[in-house]
Image (cartoon, rainbow, N blue to C red):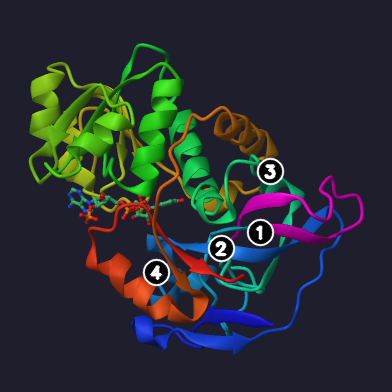
Amino acid sequence: MRAIGVTGFGGGPDALQVLDVPEPHPGKGEVRVRVHAATVNPTDSGVRAGRYRDRHENPDGPFIPGADAAGVVDEIGEGSRWAVGDRVAVVVVPFRTAGGAYQDHVVVPDASVLRLPDDVDLVAGSTFLMNALTARLVLDELALVPGQTLAVTGAAGALGGYTVQMAKADGLRVVADASEADEPLVRSLGADVVVRRGDDVAARIRAEVPDGVDGLLDGSVQAERVLAAVKDGGRVGAIRAWEGDTERGIDVHRVLVYDSVDRADLVEGLQRQLADGVYTLRVADVLPAERAAEAHRRLEAGGVRGRLVLDFS
Ligand SMILES: NC(=O)c1ccc[n+]([C@@H]2O[C@H](COP(=O)([O-])OP(=O)(O)OC[C@H]3O[C@@H](n4cnc5c(N)ncnc54)[C@H](OP(=O)(O)O)[C@@H]3O)[C@@H](O)[C@H]2O)c1
């Protein structure tokens, strides 16, 4: 069957090629999905480039990116609670020997599967689970209570956008960053206060919240530059390696979504919220799977709003 991936690390987007890989079959408690749509996330470029080379189960490759897909269940393993024909989104760990979501079929554990509401199509549905699960993990780590204030940087991005909407649903006050062009989008997601993005974002957040925010998601990966926005003893959610120091007793919590793809409880909560219309699903463009290199180039150039989606149907 068809997959898109690389046979070695370090190449640019054009290193992505169409591969012929064996068809997988589900084991106990697993499900196989015929992939219709797979999203292109920043981490996919990292997989291609070898940023996670030490994590791959099979060091010989091929290396198949992709963390998010949507499609239709077409085979179930023994004891699976899913059924053939279910329309689902799945989160996929790309470091497995079987690779990530850029494939005609993926096999995942039952816990990594979310039922899509009838009114959510497979393309839009593919853009949700991995980033929403990451947002949930970050907010759980920050452990804020209703009425406390969360700052979100990179708020116009996929992770940032879901975090803003989730935090509002959790009863938090949200301060988010945006460029001038993105401000209407970020406001429409529910941010209470929008500040201009940039190197001095922490000072702008402080100007709005003089004592500092209780927690912050560093969705723009600005690391130490965001710390000044956070109150003494506050918390930061980091979604990339945090190489610098912290200060004033601020705790930095590193989250890696792939460590938590067995959290059926969290996925079920997200499924309910998605059905309740809590989240805005944003698709930038849909490209044939064979044009994955173009999708990587566009994502890496920056400025994409909504997710690029590869069509595997
Ligand atoms: N640890 C995990 O498990 C996990 C899970 C999901 C995502 N992530 C990571 O989270 C990050 C965000 O992911 P995403 O999918 O939301 O990416 P995205 O959709 O590209 O959003 C990132 C946002 O941050 C903005 N940004 C980038 N650099 C900035 C800077 N220096 N100052 C201000 N804004 C800046 C981007 O603007 P431009 O487009 O204009 O550059 C964009 O709006 C990525 O690094 C991704 O790898 C980690």
Q: Earlier in the sequence, mark 1 or mark 2?
A: 2
Circle 3 residue: 115
Q: Which residue corresponds to the image point at 31% horizontal and 45% vertical from the top-left?
A: 219
Q: Which residue corresponds to the image point at 58% horizontal and 50% vertical from the top-left?
A: 121
Q: Earlier in the sequence, mark 4 or mark 2?
A: 2
Q: Earlier in the sequence, mark 1 or mark 3?
A: 1
> What is the CA distance from the residue labelled 4 to the residue labelled 3?
28 Å
> What is the CA distance from the residue labelled 4 to the residue labelled 2?
20 Å
Percent from the top left, x then y, of residue 122?
59, 54
Quadrant where the image shows the C terminus: bottom right
Task: Confirm or reject: label 3 Cβ below 8 Å from ligand 1.
Answer: no
**Which residue is most to the front?**
119
**Which residue is most to the right?**
78
- Categorize mark 4 by other alpha carbons within 10 Å: few (<14), some (14-19), many (20+): some
Image: magenta residue range: 71-93
* Badge nearest the viewer, 4 or 2: 2
* Badge nearest the viewer, 4 or 3: 3
- Is 185 on the left or on the right of 277, as rendered? left
> What is the CA distance from the residue labelled 1 to the residue labelled 4?
24 Å
* Residue 86 among magenta residues: yes
Question: Mark 4 falls on what kind of element?
Answer: helix
> What is the CA distance from the residue labelled 1 to the residue labelled 2?
7 Å
Q: Are marks 1 and 2 in contact (CB under 8 Å)?
A: yes
Circle 4 residue: 46
Kindly identify the amino acid type of the residue bearing the numbered disc 3.
Arg
